[in-house]
Amino acid sequence: MKYYILVTAAFLFLISCGNNSISKDIFVNNAEELNDAISQSNPGDVIILANGIWKDVPINFFGNGTEEQPITLRAENPGEVFLEGQSYLHLGGQYLIVDGLYFRNGHSPESAVIRYMIGKDSVANNCRVTSTVIESFNKPNRAINDKWIEFYGRNNQLDHCYIAGKSNDGETLRVFFTGNKHINTNHQIVNNYFGPRPRKGGPRAETLRIGDSKTRFTSGYVNVSNNFFEACNGEVEIISDKTNYNTFSHNIFYKSEGSLVLRHSNYANVDGNLFIGGDDSEFYGGIRVVNTGHWITNNYFYKIKGEQFRSPLAIMNGIPMTPLNRYLQVADIVVAYNTWVDCKSPWQIGVGQNLASADVLPISEIRSAPPIRSTIANNLIYNTSKDAKPLINHDNMDGILFKNNIINNGENEYAEYDVLKNEQVKMKPINDWLYAPEDAQNESMSDVFIGYDFEKIQQDIFGSSRSKSNNRVGAISKLSGAEAFKIDKKKYGPKWFSVEKIKVKPNIYSVSSVEGELAKMINEAKSGDIIELTDDIYTIDSSLKIDKDIIIRSQDENKVQILFEGDSDTPVFEMNPNGNIRLEHVSIKGQSNQLAFASLQENMSSAYKLSINNCEIEGFEYVLKASKGSFADSINFNKTILKNCKNGFVLAADEKGDYNAEMVTFNQCEFNNIKQNVMHFYRGGYDESTIGGYLTLTNNTFTNCGSQEKSGLLIKTPGIINVQISNNTFKNNNVKFVALLWGEKNNHHNNNTLIQSGKIKVEDQQKLEILY
């Protein structure tokens, strides 16, 4: 008997040893070895990519691990394995882990960089990508749509990744729901660092999109928690939620020009998020609400100043009998225990109500259904100075039950609506953006409304209990919890990757007019450097390539002359992706068939910037000629003379609701004898969720311009949402209209002087082609 037991034990031991021997580390040095390792992988195996640059490597990682023994693909050293060129990572199978890769200097030849599916028959389930970086991995042509990360299947995870710099068309991350095996997903998107994402100039630039209009009745169960979103400025929607039962908790939205939008979703849980803005932008957004059953609790908003769709809290009007892709009436939502500090008009109810546009829009576009059967309770609005309109009611808010909401409006009483109680609340500044109520407060702070199911709100934003003795109005129930909270950026993204960019002191180079020296120095300079021109006249015979942040200025404040003798239809300054030129005290003179500034005709993968101060530009066919595929984040001309040019600024765009410049500003400039297209800033098609671009003309003079303008318009802004024309002088301009403004949008004019220059006309409603 003892012998039998010993033999059995030995046999089991050998089997155990055999199983362990199956798991192994496989070191690979190239794509061929990698593909062989993947094809032969077994549960528990670890495939290790050698340090270095892996160029043009498509990785189809298919395998079947187990929960106890996943198959791992990892970098030899995290952050030292670089996927470049035309590379991607697609996963299929189950229980796979990818760790420590870095995508840079290239783009995916497919529709995604990371995809949790190889093909329809190889979907990923229970797979994880962690500690991985995708940085500026953009298509060469920014108009080509892709998604950097595509989720399919179920129970997949993206965590501790850094995802930043997407500039081309398409969402940064998209969760797809394409059949029963892709619903009720339980996907986890946690502890990642998203952004910056630069402004794109139109729709289809969300950072996260969960589903689409066809999935508005689909169960998602996606968890988006503990992520850091910084400068996610792609478009008005940072997150677009289009399925049901998703969770957005304890995320930080830091200085991001958009909102968390519950677009086609129902029953979302939005809890414990921080929305941190500031005085440096009017476009920082909060939460926009559409549809049914959402719980929005314990969120904190600081200096969120966006309007309408970007409001700190935007509760929208819906469309009766709405089409799938439009707006369902808001119903049965709860907004409770939130705090707004120094936000601009933090509550906007009935956003998007557009009955005035009934004559130019089909009935299926009229948002006339106000919110119903909803509760707004136990919230705190705190302003250090008076906000004239802390609540804007765009339609009818009788369908909302308001209970125990408190406002401290500086030293002023608020009385327009009786849904807010005026109280003096003692707030302690914890840091630059966090204010918390002192523990000793008046009784109204503890007089909370307990609505149906409110007992499930058991903690505040920082995890303090909302027991009966501790519960208070607002996101913060206990001062000590706020005092202990600190933003630790190391919690987000890979531990091996620093999200803090090192600031380098710029070099200043003196450049003479010796032939070729200026072009050579621009090529050799690093981004941020300053080039000072020391001679009086510089003759240039070929375009200067601008692909970095560079300042070119006169050594003193006298205008240095740049004479351009380049070929026909070539620019003095050729704007490339990421080009940012600042000119100061420079005079640029060209011939009638040349361009002062122009973008590349194609492969403008990223935005450029122009900043022109105290300069003079003369004698060109175009001052700026922008290609349809280009995008300028900002164009800023200040105290600059523009004269004797055939065309001024032509900012073309495709007919997709896009526009190809965001912030266009002219201040104290002189326009003299610009024959046509003095300003042609264009956006084609109607898409109500696109709320740019921005044209600001202030304190300028326009003289003898428009002599060849066939349209009869001096300033052409078709489809542009934000136009401000103020304190300008228009003299002897041979046009019928100085401008034709869109009154229903944010187009305004005031204090302009018009002398023999036609007039400024405002059309309240303009009919445009609907794009959806």
Image: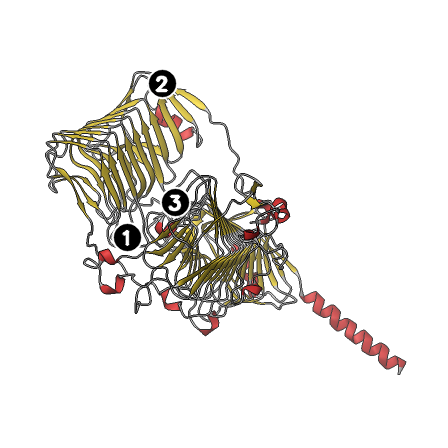
Tell me how far mark 1 sits from mark 3, CA to CA. Answer: 19 Å
**Counting residues from the N terminus, which is met first, the one under dot 2 or under dot 3?**
3
Provide the secondary structure element on which disc 2 rests. loop
Residue 15 lies in quadrant: bottom right
Within-10-Å neighbours for mark 2: few <14, some 14–19, many 20+: some
Which residue is more in the foreground, 757 or 614?
757
Residue position for label 2: 512
Left or right of residue 330, residue 33 in this image: right
In contact (CB < 8 Å): disc 2 and disc 1 = no
The residue at the point 54 percent across, 40 percent down is 500
Above or below, 259 against 387 in this view is below
User: Would you say residue 496 is visible in this rendering?
Assistant: no
The numbered mark at residue 657 is 1
In contact (CB < 8 Å): disc 2 and disc 3 = no
Above or below, 266 against 505 in this view is below
Tell me how far mark 2 sits from mark 1, CA to CA. Answer: 45 Å
Residue 644 lies in quadrant: top left
Q: Amino acid at mark 2?
A: Ser
User: Picture coordinates of residue 224 (x, y %)?
Assistant: 51, 58
Q: How many marks?
A: 3
Which residue is more in the foreground, 161 or 338?
338
User: Picture coordinates of residue 631 (x, y %)?
Assistant: 32, 43
Choose mark 2 or mark 1, whichever is in front: 1
**Counting residues from the N terminus, which is met first, the one under dot 2 or under dot 1?**
2
Which residue is most to the right? Answer: 2
Tell me how far mark 2 sits from mark 3, CA to CA. Answer: 43 Å
The residue at the point 75 percent across, 68 percent down is 17
Provide the secondary structure element on which disc 1 rests. loop
The residue at the point 35 percent across, 36 percent down is 609
User: Picture coordinates of residue 597 (x, y %)?
Assistant: 27, 34
Q: Quadrant of the N terminus?
A: bottom right
The numbered mark at residue 283 is 3
